[in-house]
Structures are given as C-alpha cells and as structure tokens.
Image (tube, rainbow, N blue to C red):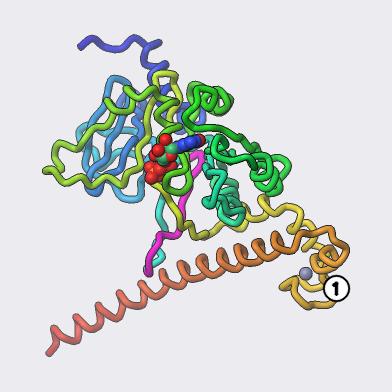
Amino acid sequence: MSLPTQRDAAGQLRALGWSKYFADQATSAALSKTPPVRITQVHRNTLHIQGVDLDMIIPGLHGVTVGDWLLFDADTPRNSQLLSRKSLIKRRAPGHDRKEQLIAANLDTAFVVTSCNNDFSLARLERYVAMAHEAGVTPVIILSKIDLTTEASDFAAQAQSISPQLSVVCLDARSPEAIELLRPWCQAGQTVAFLGSSGVGKSTLTNSLAGNEAIATQDVRASDDKGRHTTTGRQLHILPSGCAVLDTPGMREIQLTDVSVGLEETFADLHALKQNCRFNDCAHKTEPGCAVQAAVASGEVDVPRLQRWLKLVAEDAENTKFLANRKLRDRAKNKLEKSVTKYNSKK
Ligand SMILES: Nc1nc2c(ncn2[C@@H]2O[C@H](COP(=O)(O)OP(=O)(O)OP(=O)(O)O)[C@@H](O)[C@H]2O)c(=O)[nH]1
Ligand SMILES: [Zn+2]
C-alpha cells in the first residue's frame, strides 16, 4: 500500500469532519505520532475507528461515544487521547437507574425528524430542540411524509412556533428533492445526525444522502465479536461527498438532564418575561407580581406552551438533582461496603 500524499490525507481527514478546532488541540509531532481517528461506531467492547487510510476495530474505551476524535496510539490503543468535543448530545437513559447516556459527539447539525401524522408532538420537538441547543448543535426540524397529508403547512406552522429562528423543512423523504433541501447543512466536513421516533424516515434520508451502496458497504462487523452483534445501532457514515451522517435508532423517550441553557434558548420569550417576576423563585402560577401570568392574562403567552415549559424545567431540575444525588449515594454505598468487608474480615 502506498503512503497517502499530504493532500489526500488532508482531504480524507476533512471528509471525516476534522477541522481547526481539533487540529489546534495537538502539536504536529503528536499528530504524526498518534494520528487522529474518528469513532464511527461503538460496540459493547470495541470501537470502530476511521482515519487516514485506516479503518479498524479497536478495544473499547471508557466514556467515549460515536463522533469522538481520538489521537490514536497504535501500540497501546487504550492510551489513545480523547480530543475535546465541539458538541455533545446526551440524555438520561430510559429505565430506573437514570444513567446518563452519551448519544453523539461533535455534531454540527441535528435533523429532528417527525412525520406529519400522529407522531407529531410539539412537546417532543421542544425537548429535542432544547437538547440540541444545550449540546451546541444547530437543530433543524424535518417534517416528513408530506405526501400523505393535506395539512403539511399546519404542521410546519406549529413547528415554527417553537422559535422564528428555527429552520423547518417539509419533505417526502423518498423523493430526490429531499436531499436538495438538506444540502445546505450537509456540505463537506460537516457532521449531521437524524434524530426522531421509529419509522419517521431517518434511514430513508440517510440512505438517499449516501446512495444506498455506500452505507451497505460500510457496515463493518467486529471480527472479534464472536458473532454477537452488540452494536448500539448508532453509526457514523462517511459519505463520498465528505459529509458524515449519523443514523440513530428511534428514540421515543428522551429525558432531559442539565439542559437549563438549552431550555433558556428554546423558550427565550418566557425566559425574558420571568426576569420581571417579583420573586426570584417565582413558580409562575399564583404568585403576586408574576410577569409570566400577567403576559398570559394579556394574551401574549400561549398557555399550553407555558405548561410545556414548566414541565420541562421541572423535569430537568429533577433529573439533574437525581443524578447529583446518585453520585453522592454511590459514594456512601462504596464506603459502607468497604466497612462491611472490613468488619467481616475481622470476624
Ligand atoms: N410516503 C412516505 N413514506 C415515507 C416517508 N419517509 C419514510 N417513509 C417510509 O416509512 C417507512 C419507515 O422509514 P425509515 O426511513 O425506515 O424510518 P426510520 O426513522 O429510519 O425508522 P427506524 O429505523 O425504526 O428508527 C419506510 O417504509 C419508508 O419508505 C415519506 O416522507 N413519505
Ligand atoms: Zn412568575
């Protein structure tokens, strides 16, 4: 195999999403000793990485997610260094233990896909938009299946009500025009993800962006996985056009943690009003001098939107507190276990 020319190497890195932001984090000596690679898939015990003329499976690393950049130490992969992230999407995992789950790193754009039917939920869209804002990712709402409804513009108007600055795109995911509509966010060097419930058209859009062949051939299985297919299902596809696309399995439940900034941006109008409430800890319900309730009374604020905001703020506060408390509890439990072991060994 011939060595890549410098120009080839730069082009390959750019197609993987490499940019100055990451290059600035390492000296050129470090970059040549430990070349940058991007994590394109996370399996239970292994990672799939891609770099310049490099495409391989390495042992898993703790605390990394799809989209992360590593300075790859080929001799001792577990010593590879994680580069600081440009953005990070995470959620509270479904289930009782409420662990934080990393969804994807270093995205530029999150396409939040919902179809113009029963899947459409303004409350869920607001959650995704808040999550994207918090993560530092540009949210774009995609309304799919417009060919199956006569009310696409109503759905679009509702989605646009989240914020006038938000981009809202209506499309038939199976049509050739769909890709043209997404093109502004899918330039070379960009990383985009499709998020949304199952069956809304995420894979259809990913496949048309890629051309079916590109994705089918990139689906590498971990050879050391002994037949167990343990991928989380999230995979970053590096397209021939130089855009990286993340396809995710449907996520119906997203619980928010640590998204106070994202909520502020998503509900900027309500956040601005709240600054004028008489009490700092105003719950915006029956308190005297509540600027939010005054705006409701004057018809300036939409009541269902206010209720969704209050619910999300409460959910974020509760989950964030739960996670913080859990860390404390885990520490206390460890201490207790240690003292029990000590006691037992004395017996
Ligand atoms: N008529 C119509 N059908 C669509 C559209 N988008 C997707 N579909 C169909 O809906 C079905 C589900 O689409 P997928 O792309 O697999 O949905 P997904 O979001 O990837 O679903 P998961 O992989 O389960 O998360 C397929 O049969 C698509 O052909 C659309 O805009 N219009
Ligand atoms: Zn108030």
Q: Residue at x 75, y 58 (%)?
A: 270
Q: Is residue 190 above or below residue 42?
A: above
Q: Position of residue 192 (x, y in %)?
A: 48, 34
Q: Residue at x 54, y 70 (%)?
A: 318
Magenta run includes residue 8: no
Region in magenta = 82-96
Q: Residue at x 56, y 66 (%)?
A: 315
Q: From where the camera sits, is residue 80 visible? A: yes
User: Which quadrant of the figure has residue 60?
Assistant: top left
Q: Position of residue 15 (x, y in %)?
A: 42, 22
Identify which residue, 219 or 222, lies in the foreground: 219
- Tell me which image quadrant ligand 2 sits in: bottom right
Taking 256 as reference, is 210 left or right?
left
Query: Mark 1, residues whose alpha carbon is within 10 Å: few (<14), some, or many (≥20)?
Result: some
Q: Residue at x 63, y 40 (%)?
A: 150
Q: Position of residue 59 (x, y in %)?
A: 21, 42
Residue at the disc numbered 1 = 289
Helix, strand or loop at disc 1?
loop
Q: Is residue 320 above or below residue 59?
A: below
Q: Position of residue 257 (x, y in %)?
A: 51, 60
Q: From where the camera sits, is residue 281 visible? A: no
Q: Residue furthest bottom?
A: 347
Identify which residue, 139 or 121, lies in the foreground: 121
Q: Amino acid at mark 1?
A: Gly
User: Which quadrant of the figure has residue 149?
Assistant: top right
Magenta run includes residue 88: yes
Q: Is residue 118 above or below residue 53?
A: below
Q: Is mark 1 within 8 Å of ligand 2?
A: yes
Identify which residue, 53 or 103, lies in the foreground: 103
Quadrant the N terminus occupies: top left
Q: Is residue 247 above or below residue 319?
A: above
